[in-house]
Image (tube, grey):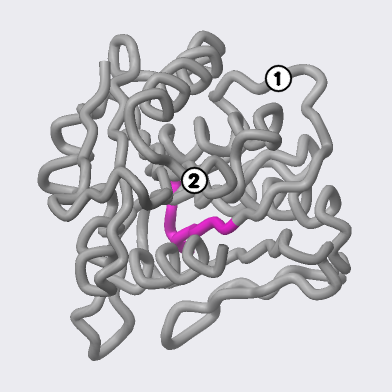
Amino acid sequence: SYIIDIPASYDPAKPYRLFYVSHGLNGRAQDTAGIFKYFGLLPQATAANDPAVFIAGQGLKGTWGEVDHVYFDDVPNFVKNSLCIDETRIFVTGMSMGGMYSYSLSTDRQKSIRAGVGLAPTNFNIWLPNPKLKDPVAWMQTTGNIDTYCPWVSDAAMMKGSKFIALEKATNNGCTIPTEIPFWQSGAHLCYDFAGCKADYPVKACSFMGPHTDSARDPGSNVNWIAVESWKFFTQF
């Protein structure tokens, strides 16, 4: 099942961005659409007067897996038959396992997805296609420095951790791979934009002082910069 948010000012002659937003493990679509407001994207769209269509999916038994790649095909296709959707601007995002599911989708649904943002994702404990397709897709991710659920590096030898998602995307997108990806050390959040990526396929890795979360504020600020950076990343397309 899923919840859909259609702009109050919906114009059937205008193509809208579509955001496919996924909850974390044991999460609920009601919360994604309700208290989390699509992880801050809906308020960003409202503030920018740039309405979009939002979908909050409900995973079977509160999780995501192989069957949900077919679910992703079905839901946006059904919505596209009912609403005016810009098929070149379909985006995926989610928190924790929802971020991992977004990452998983980005490895074999690149022809459908324009960009993805993984909020506290990692590359293990989630079903991944085998083989993963190497087509480029614009990608951004966030990781807290004390995230113990989906850490930056869980097992370097096995290439487990969110760091290795960023490296994979940067490689697929033709970006320049640095000796080491800059990671937060102090102060405000740090977002690293990989250089040299294929045109229109940027890769951004953001890190910050904090735990496993979709909402973070820099010292002295009450603004959730994760939502701001996510919206900014998506709306460049």
Name which quarter of the figure residue 5 lies in. Answer: top left
* Residue 130: image location, x then y, percent: 77, 17
Range covered by the magenta-colored residues? 140-148
Look at label 2 and name its amino acid.
Asp
Residue situated in front as seen by the camera: 209 or 33: 33
Q: Residue at x 28, y 58 (%)?
A: 51
Residue under label 2: 86
Nearer to us in this view, 71 or 190 = 71
Give amino acid for label 1. Answer: Pro
Q: Residue furthest front?
A: 13
Query: If you read the primary sequence from the N terminus, does the residue marked by circle 2 or circle 1 appear first?
Result: 2
Question: In the rendered view of the protein, which quadrant contains the C terminus?
Answer: bottom right
Q: Residue 182 placed where, x, y %?
A: 68, 75
Q: Which residue is rendered at x = 45% and y = 78% of the image?
A: 189
Quarter location, residue 23: top left
Q: Which mark is residue 129?
A: 1
Q: Does residue 40 appear to the left or right of 86 in the view shown?
A: left
Tell me, yes or no, whether the highlighted magenta stretch contains residue 145. Answer: yes
Residue at 24%, 78% in the rendered image: 223
Question: Residue 72: image x %, image y %?
Answer: 48, 22
Instruction: Kindly indicate whether the residue at mark 1 contacts the one at mark 2 (C-beta within 8 angstroms).
Output: no
Front disc: 2 or 1: 2
